[in-house]
Structure formats: C-alpha cells, structure tokens
Image: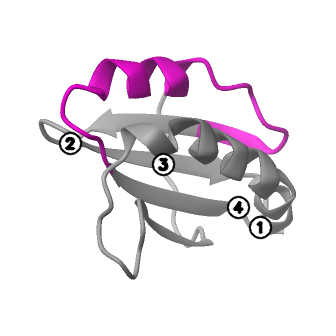
Amino acid sequence: MSKFTNVVRFSVKKGSEKLFETQINNMNRWDGLLIHVVAKTGTSSYVSYGLWESEQSMSLARPKMIELLDSCRDFLEEISPELGVTDPVSGPVISEYIDI
C-alpha cells in the first residue's frame, strides 16, 4: 500500500484564531496518521497537512476528522457556497523526502 496525503485549507473568523488553534492543538492522535501539520498561512488563513499510512487508514479516520471539523465549525468562515468552510484535496504520495 502506498502512503496517502490530505491537505485542507481553512479561513478562520477574525477574533477566533486562538480558539481555533487551541481546538486543533487539543486533537487526539488518529491511527494511521504519520504526520499532521497545521500552518498559519495568513492573518486568518490556515492549511492542514496529513500524511497517512494508506488511503484506507485515512478513510477509517474520516468520522474523527469530521468530528474535529464540527468542533471548529463555529470558528470558520465560508470559503464559498460550493466548498463550505473547507477546501480539501487528497491523493496518493508519489514522492517523499523526510529529514527529521
């Protein structure tokens, strides 16, 4: 099985940044999640990156990911009517370099 990745873009309501960051920092570890990084990419914009053991492990964690999103939903701005409050993409890893 190849590793799998997901990336999600968020826009946080002004004044809710610290609440959002606290909620994200308190998330539980999910089985199959190898790396999880959340970066602040602007005043109120963030991106989340996850590296998974496999697509299946990500799929099995999806209910917990939705639960986390639901706990943060009040802090998030709608990106667009089509996307809602997240802009997610995912796919198989085709190249990897990690030097930690």
Distance between mark 1 and mark 2 Cα atoms: 26 Å
Density class for disc 2 (Cα within 10 Å; few <14, some 14-19, many ≥20) is: few
Q: Are marks 4 and 2 in contact (CB under 8 Å)?
A: no
Q: Position of residue 21 (x, y in %)?
A: 40, 23
Disc sitting over residue 76 in the figure: none
Indicate which disc residue 55 carries.
1
Which of the two labelled residues, at mark 2 and mark 3, occupies the earlier sequence position?
2
**Secondary structure under the numbered disc 4 in the rendered image:** loop
The crowd level at tag 4 (other Cα within 10 Å; few <14, some 14-19, many 20+) is many
Give the x, y percent position of residue 16: 30, 27
Between marks 1 and 4 in the image, the one whose residue lies nearer the viewer: 1
Q: Amino acid at mark 3?
A: Tyr
Which residues lie in the magenta part? Answer: 11-35
* Cα–Cα span, label 1 and label 4: 7 Å
The residue pinned by badge 2 equals: 41
The foreground one among 97 and 74 is 74
* The N terminus - image quarter: bottom right
In which quarter of the view is residue 71 placed? top right
Callout 1 crowding tier (Cα within 10 Å): few <14, some 14–19, many ≥20: many
Give the mark, 1 or 2, whose residue is nearer the N terminus: 2
Residue shown at 43%/61% (left/top)? 86
Q: How far apart, in angstroms, are the residues tagged by discs 2 and 3?
A: 12 Å
Q: Residues within 10 Å of mark 3 (few under 14, many from 20)?
A: some
- List the residue tagged with mark 3: 49
State the SS at label 3: strand
Pick whichever of labels 4 and 3 is earlier in the sequence.
4
Q: Residue at x 39, y 37 (%)?
A: 75
- What type is the residue that disc 2 sits on? Thr
